[in-house]
């Protein structure tokens, strides 16, 4: 029998059933009150990591690499908090994608720096909003849409059912969603004065990359921010977001990077990484340290960091 490609499978194909099951679980979580969902998910986070010892080791190794000035007690404390945040991520994704408009509208949120976006648009420029992978990433994107129209860039999911459901959910509040390979659409949107949010803080195997410092460590980093800004004339603005202890959300739009882009992709990518590092240091316990950010080394002779 000929094997059916994932991309061509219909949504009712048995291959898609796990994706539908995941969507159903997330939809149900989004029906739970926000504070309750966070508390339950936070309790599950350490249990899940206990079953995934490799991810736990990556978390601890990342903290040791990125914060060598911290004491062992401080790193262990942040690791415990981050384990709980890893659980909270599930609740935040559920609320971001499938929370009802009425309930999400009741979440307390503050924002600062809207004037930076307005100034860029008044000058006829689009905006590249760059941020990091935090536990409440998807919910933060939905919340900023209360104040400003926003489109997003994303990596396509291999499960057609999950991809269909999540993209449809995102388009309930976002202007548009672009796959990472939809360059023409992204440039057209930016040149029309639109704002696109994406997170260039992880290691990707596809795309033009350079090694640029990230927390003082050479890290394989996409040059996409430099390239998109150069081709579209868009301003590059950092997007900082955190969940406060009282359950409210704080959003901050940084001033645009000055004299960006330059002619040097490495220099520009270094500046973007420095901006991301500044954002992460504001709430390190909420960042996704489970990702092996420094897996690829500049030369084969260097020992692996994980």
Image: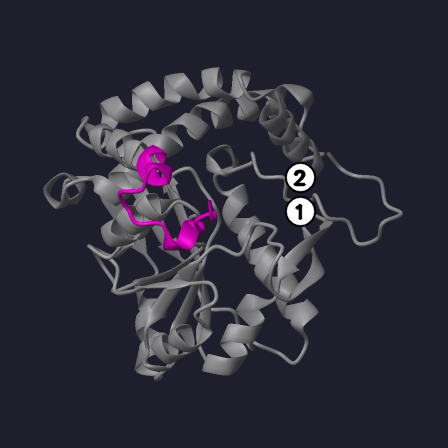
Q: Residue at x 25, y 65 (%)?
A: 175
Q: Which residue is mark 1?
A: 215
- Residue furthest toward the right? 301
Residue 4 is one of the magenta-drawn residues? yes
Q: Residue at x 59, y 28 (%)?
A: 55
User: Separation of disc 1 and disc 2 at Cα?
Assistant: 5 Å
Q: Which residue is mark 2?
A: 66
Q: Please say if 47 is above or below 143.
A: above
> How many labels, in total?
2
Circles 1 and 2 in contact, beta carbons < 8 Å: yes
Instruction: Mark 2: give few (<14), some (14-19) or many (20+) Cα within 10 Å.
Output: some
Q: Residue at x 47, y 47 (%)?
A: 3
Mark 1, secondary structure of its residue: loop
Q: Which of the two discs, 1 and 2, labels the residue nearer the N terminus?
A: 2
Q: Identify the mark at residue 121; answer none if there is no mark.
A: none
Extent of the magenta region: 1-18
In front: 72, or 273? Answer: 273
Q: Position of residue 192 (x, y in %)?
A: 32, 81
Mark 2, secondary structure of its residue: helix
Instruction: Mark 1: give few (<14), some (14-19) or many (20+) Cα within 10 Å.
Output: some
Left or right position of 249 against 238? left
Q: Residue 108, can we see it? A: no
Q: Position of residue 293 (x, y in %)?
A: 63, 44
Left or right position of 107 against 252? left
Quarter holding the C terminus is: top right
In front: 133, or 124? Answer: 133
Q: Position of residue 5 (x, y in %)?
A: 45, 51
Q: Residue at x 34, y 84 (%)?
A: 124
């Amino acid at each position: 029998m000929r094997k059916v490609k994932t991309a061509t499978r219909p949504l009712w194909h048995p291959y898609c059933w796990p994706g539908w099951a995941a969507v159903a679980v997330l939809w149900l979580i989004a029906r739970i009150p926000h504070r309750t969902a966070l508390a339950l998910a936070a309790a599950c986070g350490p249990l899940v990591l206990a079953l995934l010892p490799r991810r736990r080791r990556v978390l601890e190794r990342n903290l040791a690499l990125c914060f060598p000035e911290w004491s062992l007690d401080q790193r262990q404390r942040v690791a415990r908090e981050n384990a709980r945040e890893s659980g909270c991520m599930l609740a935040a994704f559920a609320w971001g994608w499938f929370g009802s408009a009425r309930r999400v509208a009741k979440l307390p949120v503050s924002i600062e720096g809207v004037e930076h976006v307005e100034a860029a648009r008044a000058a006829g420029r689009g905006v590249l909003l760059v941020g990091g992978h935090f536990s409440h990433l998807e919910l933060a994107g939905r919340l900023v849409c209360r104040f400003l129209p926003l489109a997003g860039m994303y990596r396509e999911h291999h499960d057609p059912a999950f991809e269909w459901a999540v993209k449809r959910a995102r388009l309930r509040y976002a202007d548009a969603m672009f796959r990472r390979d939809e360059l023409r659409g992204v440039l057209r949107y930016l040149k029309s004065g639109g704002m696109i949010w994406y997170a260039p803080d992880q290691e990707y195997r596809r795309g033009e990359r350079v090694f640029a410092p990230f927390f003082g460590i050479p890290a394989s980093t996409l040059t996409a921010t430099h390239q998109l800004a150069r081709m579209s004339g868009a301003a590059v603005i950092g997007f900082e977001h955190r969940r406060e202890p009282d359950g409210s959300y704080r959003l901050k739009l940084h001033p645009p990077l000055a004299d960006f882009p330059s002619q040097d992709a490495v220099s520009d990518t270094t500046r973007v990484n420095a901006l991301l590092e500044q954002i992460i240091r504001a709430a390190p316990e909420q960042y996704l340290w489970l990702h092996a950010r420094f897996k690829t080394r500049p030369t084969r002779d260097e020992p692996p960091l994980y």
